[in-house]
Amino acid sequence: MGTPNQAILTTMAAIVLAILALSTLCSIEAQEGGFSVELIHRDSSKSPFYNPLETTSDRVTNALRRSFNRVHRFKRNSVPTTAAESDLTADSGEYLMKISLGTPRFDIVAIADTGSDLIWTQCKPCSQCFKQDAPFFDPSKSSTYRKISCSASQCIDLERTSCSTDHSCQYAVSYGDSSFSDGDLAADTLTLASTTGRPVAFPKTVIGCGTFNGGTFDEKTSGIIGLGGGQVSLISQLRTSVAGKFSYCLLPISQAGNSSKINFGSNAIVSAPGVVSTPLVKKSPDTFYFLTLEAITVGTKRIKFTGSSLGSEEGNIIIDSGTTLTLLPSEFYSEVESAMTSQISAKRIEGPEGVSLCYNAKDEFKIPDVTVHFTNADVKLKPLNTFIRVSDTAICFTFNSLDDIVAIYGNLSQMDFLIGYDTQKQTVSFQPTDCSKN
């Protein structure tokens, strides 16, 4: 029989565990009710990247530059069949998420990336790590952390893994700018801070615990949260808990100081009047979300899409929240730009490097309607989706061209739309929305 003190300690421990259980929403409850998480723009005051000395023009120009840097990851001839993530650019995403790993919870802010899969962070002990402002995750302090064995399906199914001397699985991720992360493939409890204030915990989530990392990573980030379509992405791992559904509503760039939301499960259902839906197309690599673009109408002129390096048929464009501009093959873009310039009488001026079409912001002119025609879904864009002020004197078209690339539907075209992904029904839905009220 224990002593009175032991009985008291046992009772107190039970109470603490009960409180923790009540304060954390489990994955089963999440499936039934759904939940939402903050999606933080990297220029928000809530972001570790926030620079109060930058002007709005500085932030827009930097976002455009990152858009051009990021796009090389999508070149079809640069995506090896053995490593779908090999041509990412480190820290190139535009949004961040807060997550917690382990038990007790350890908070992390990392790049939320629809163009990659693995969730990884820097871990102790680290044989080589890039400089990071935040503390490293220490797996020895987590009671729920477990290394994954080489014989486990999670290791076998993941590209570029190897086996260590203790028969645990080692992962390796490399990026197009020579950045990399190598370390232990593990499972631990991942907790998301729901906007309802009640955390949502997902036990045994596969993560990468990086102990050998380097390259161009910024010291303000702690790693990457993969939101792609591959097997180890956050989206795929939560699939049964959230019925394969997630959605987001991106605030206009002028409101980037506030947080957007990413929704899961029943919270992610997009079903209001005005919703249009288009098929998600399964293609390689499965990281990316492929749609089929049929045409773009500018004013009254409809321009048929003749295809990209992904082909002219199904799955000829990628929708990506981490790329700012909508990027199109040169020949097709030229037709779109020509249709736009023929309907605007304002004076063209030079814009930021790489941006094709800009006008004097002091001139008053009517922006022609633009409709993007996906299969079964005509998405009518607003002026905030098609033109953006980049300085006091310049307003620029948010569509652009780059030679020899796939087509990418960027985040400026997605702002003020509730965009829902249903990975079970294989659809993407668009609903015009005031995201500040969503």
Image (cartoon, helix red, strand yellow):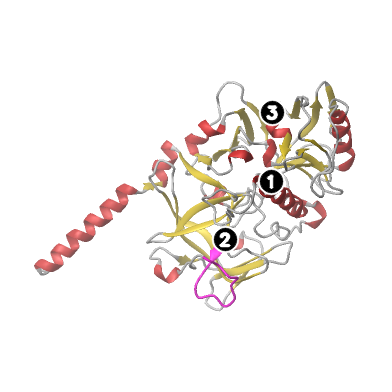
Between the residue at mark 3 and the residue at mark 2, the CA separation in whole angstroms equals 33 Å
The amino acid on which the numbered mark 2 sits, given as a three-letter code, is Thr
The amino acid type, in three-letter code, at marker 3 is Lys
**Disc 3: CA contacts within 10 A as few (<14), some (14-19) or many (>=20):** some
Residue 376 in the image: state x and y as whole percent. Answer: 71, 26
Which quadrant holds the N terminus?
bottom left
Give the residue pinned by disc 1.
Answer: 57
What residue is disc 3 on? 382
| Residue 212, disc | none
Q: Nearer the viewer, residue 293 or 332?
A: 332
Q: Return the disc, 3 or 2, that comes first in the chain's sequence.
A: 2
Magenta stretch: includes residue 269: no
Within the image, what quadrant is residue 384 found in? top right
Q: Nearer the viewer, mark 3 or mark 1?
A: 1
In the image, residue 182 sits, relative to residue 93, either above or below, namely below
Q: Percent x, y for residue 24?
A: 36, 49
Image point 68% across, 39% down: which residue?
A: 412
Residue drawn at x 40%, y 48% as measured from the top left: 199
Mark 1: give few (<14), some (14-19) or many (20+) Cα within 10 Å: some
Q: Main secondary structure of the magenta part?
A: loop
Which disc number belongs to residue 221?
Answer: 2
Q: Residue at x 48, y 66 (%)?
A: 137
Q: Which segment did they paint magenta?
A: 120-133
